[in-house]
Amino acid sequence: MTNVVVIGSQWGDEGKGKIVDWLSERADVVVRFQGGHNAGHTLVIDGVSYKLSLLPSGVVRPGKKAVIGNGVVVDPHALLAEIDRLGAQGVTVTADSLRVADNATLILSLHRELDGMREDAASNSGTKIGTTRRGIGPAYEDKVGRRAIRVMDLADLDALGAKVERILTHHNALRRGFNVAEVEHQTIMDELTAVADRILPFMETVWAMLDKERRKGSRILFEGAQGSLLDIDHGTYPFVTSSNTVAGQAAAGSGMGPGALGYILGITKAYTTRVGEGPFPTELNDEIGQFLGEKGHEFGTVTGRKRRCGWFDAALVRQSVATNGITGIALTKLDVLDGLDELKICVGYMLDGQQIDHLPAAQAAQARVEPIYVTLEGWKQSTVGARKWADLPAQAIKYVRQVEELIGAPVALLSTSPERDDTILVTDPFED
């Protein structure tokens, strides 16, 4: 038995919700370790859809412990609103089922406002990043700048005033630069005291709790948000998120040592999508791209934004396999490719007349690369609902085997529809 880390191997939106739900049913503890409410996924359980952004997937299953780790930035209002939405669907979230790290950073209204002001200014200058305007980046900046308000600070209102003063010294200077009214000290104090009584019951020393769970043999599932190619260090910078999204962050963002991580499962879509700005070498601005978007229902769970679609990029996923130490992948949405005459897979790039096998880190170089493709025959038969290899067309199996070879990692699970049971299990990550 081992613990499992689930990460996205592309730019997010790989279908983590279904896979995490399938795994969380077998886990004892589910831990979110980075990001905030800027990413989301949909779980479908007994025909009921649950849209989660901040809460770990395990929270919808009775008897599971859901944990928000220290690597997450927490908007308390968004957290409480999500808890209330689940409550309206019949899922009661209690202090027994959800624990939030005492040293997690809080997102405040001034973070959301700064995010929006920056994005508006960038739009005017043509340098927009494409953030969700939810304050994620500014909150991480304050964390690194050692002026953040953390969950534990809600328990000591007497000391909170000085901390609010420190963060306002920084933010009001920025607001003056944007020619925007400064934030009053009492405004932030009122904002925090209004949520303290509802947030504090969930507070936990998470690293200690997880250490106890590990020692008693609990199965721990680490749940990442976004995708590896949005990692602040290893992604397509600057068109990335504000946190580390690679598997190593599961240790730092939860307080567990790297040795406890176990199996690294990379969720990988059978084609490629991206939301927002940034490079996308295999993007298809034609009828095939439109076909993939419509058939795959490619709209963001959180923002509703239409996703850009393109061919599978094996060079990028191979890069993610290396930076994450991926043990095996869960290949999703294979059924979306049904009916295409031929399929293409990117195996590398041409850059200024030279062939390269990875996406360069430089922004200008990323914009100049041209994909190198191999072409495979498509299949006309439906793969929807296949639950064993014998149910798949021969060409679909060939496509999967080609993906495995090109990325240097085996397929552990193969998803053939949004339904959780429409999955071909090759390797059980918890038992590997």
Image (tube, rainbow, N blue to C red):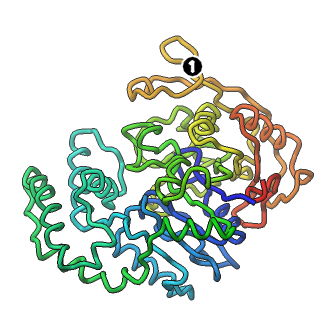
Residue 81 in sight? yes
- Quarter of image, res 49: bottom right
- Quarter of image, res 160: bottom left
In the displayed structure, 227 sits above or below 205; it is above
- Give SS at disc 1: strand
Q: Is residue 356 left or right of residue 152?
A: right
What residue is disc 1 on? 356
Give x and y (percent) for residue 412. 76, 50
User: Which residue is drawn at the image coordinates 62% and 63% (left, top)?
Assistant: 221
Q: Is residue 39 left or right of residue 340?
A: left
Give x and y (percent) for residue 132. 36, 57
Give x and y (percent) for residue 198. 36, 85
User: Which residue is drawn at the image coordinates 43% and 79% (left, top)?
Assistant: 202
In-front residue for pair 153/62: 153
In-front residue for pair 386/410: 410
In the displayed structure, 294 sits above or below 99; it is above
Residue 52 in sight? no
How many numbered circles are shown?
1
In-front residue for pair 238/102: 102
